Structure formats: C-alpha cells, structure tokens
Image (cartoon, grey):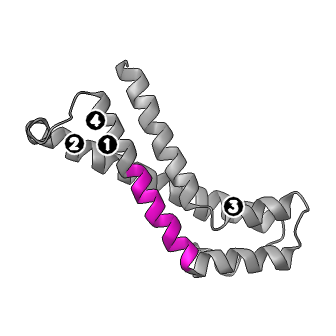
Amino acid sequence: MSQTQDVRTLWRWILGSAFLASMCCFPSVLLVGIGLMTVSAGDALSNNLYFGPARWILYGLTAIILGWGLYRHFQAQGICTLDQAKRERNRIVNTALLVFISAFTIYFVWNYIILELAGMAVGLPWEDSAFWR
C-alpha cells in the first residue's frame, strides 16, 4: 500500500468516526428535513439521543474506531511489534494526537455548526441552545 493510500485510509477512519459521533443529532435533522418526522418528534429524538446514554456510547465507539484505524494504519506501515512501536514512539504519538485532534475538530464543526444550522433551518428549536449564544 502506498503512502498516499495510507493517508487516505486514515482520513476515512477520521471522517467516519466524526460522523458516527454526531449520530445523536444527524438523524433528527435528516428525518425532519425530508419530511418523515415532525419538528417536535425530531426535537424529542435529538434530546433523547444527546442527553441520554446514546451520546456516550457513540463517543466510546468513536474512540474505538479511531484506535482501530490507527492500529491498522501502523500495521500497514510495518509497525507490528512492541519493539518496533518503541522505536517509532514519537511518530506514533504525533500521528495519534493529530488523528484525535482532527476527528474532534471535524466533529465539532459538523455537529455544533453545520448540523445545528441545518436543524434550525428545518425548524428544530435549537437556536436557544446554540453554543454561540
């Protein structure tokens, strides 16, 4: 696998995990937006998912997916043993920090800006709880 493919694959893991973390709000925006759910039902769904245990389960799954993606990335680069990992410790730590910061930034922008604005555009009553207020 080439270096470019490794980086692309890692970005797929990052984007997928950021999208998974936002699944507490995305379904209600989508279903209200295409007319399959009323605004009040969409608001109740997003509140139940966001303030209930589902958000923490999604965050946990996101961390697991990011960890698995990093494992696969380094395995494809030939870092398979603990001795190799010790020799490449700086690269592993720097890549892991970059991956987690990138995933968090993408999640934050997607969930708290784009989805929030889209939710307000379809009529969900999220304006009072927007983080910029």
Viewer-proximal residue, 15 or 116? 15
Residue 116, quarter of picture: bottom right
Magenta-drawn segment: 53-66
Question: Could you tell whether 64 is left or right of 132 in the image?
Answer: left
Please name the predominant secondary structure of the magenta segment in the image. Answer: helix
Question: Could you tell whether 75 is left or right of 39 in the image?
Answer: left
Q: Which mark is residue 92?
A: 2
Residue indicated by mark 1? 71
Residue indicated by mark 3? 26
Q: Secondary structure at mark 3?
A: helix
Residue 77 seen in render = yes
Q: Earlier in the sequence, mark 2 or mark 1?
A: 1
Q: Which amino acid type corresponds to the residue marked 4 in the rendered image?
A: Phe
Question: Could you tell whether 76 is left or right of 53 in the image?
Answer: left
Q: Which amino acid type corresponds to the residue marked 2 in the rendered image?
A: Ile
Q: Which amino acid type corresponds to the residue marked 1 in the rendered image?
A: Tyr
Q: Check the picture and name the quadrant holding the C terminus.
A: bottom right
Asked whether 59 falls inside the magenta stretch, the response is yes
